[in-house]
Image: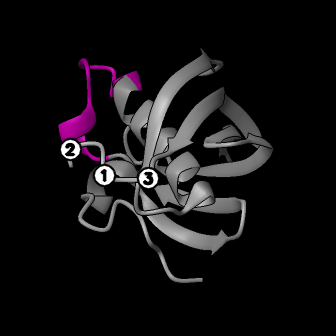
Amino acid sequence: MDIKTHEKIDQSLCGKPLQVEEGYSRVELTPTGSMVADDSGLIHGGFIFGMADYAAMLAVNHPNVVLGASDVKFLKPVKVSETVIAEAKVGEQAGKKRIAAVTVSRKDEPVFEGTFTCFVLDNHVLG
C-alpha cells in the first residue's frame, strides 16, 4: 500500500515502515545515541511516543490525518540500540474520528501501549 501521510517525516527519528495496510501498520526503530537521555543509555520516551504516533498515522494513512488525543502507558525502559517494533491497528471509526491501538515491543516484550484518537480532516490542518 502506498504511504499517503507524513511523507517527509525523518524515519531515523520516528521509525521505518515495515508494513502499511488499510487500518494497520508496523514500524521499526533502532534508537541512536542522539535519543539518549542519560549516561545509562536510556532512550527519552518522546522518541517512543513519536514512533507510536507515526504508526497510528500510517494505519489511518490519509493525507489530512492529525492526532487529537492519546492515552498511553510506558511499560518498560528502552536503551540505545535496542530495536523496537510498533504495531498499530485502527478499530473504532465514526465520521472523521479513527481510534488506533498501538503497541511498541522489544522482541515479544511490550514496552509501550497507547490509544491514539486521530481525525481525518477535509483539508490540511494548516490549510
In 3D space, how far apart are the residues under numbered discs 2 and 1 (Cα atoms)?
5 Å
Q: Report if residue 43 is visible in the image.
A: no
In 3D space, how far apart are the residues under numbered discs 3 and 2 (Cα atoms)?
11 Å
Indicate the position of residue 117 as horizontal and vertical percent values. 60, 31
Span shown in magenta: 32-45
Q: Which mark is residue 103?
A: none
Q: Report if residue 30 is visible in the image.
A: yes
Q: Which residue is mark 3?
A: 122
Colouring of the image: one colour
Query: Where is 64 relative to 44, above or below?
Result: below
Q: Which residue is mark 2?
A: 126
In 3D space, how far apart are the residues under numbered discs 1 and 3 (Cα atoms)?
7 Å
| Secondary structure of the residue carrying numbered label 1 | loop
**In the rendered structure, which amino acid carries the disc numbered 2?**
Leu
Q: Tell me the quarter of the picture where residue 126 sits.
A: top left
Q: Which residue is mark 1?
A: 124
| Secondary structure of the residue carrying numbered label 2 | loop
Single out the mark in the foreground, 1 or 3. Answer: 3
Indicate the position of residue 8 as horizontal and vertical percent values. 23, 65
Query: Where is 57 relative to 102, above or below?
Result: below
**Residue 33 among those drawn in magenta:** yes
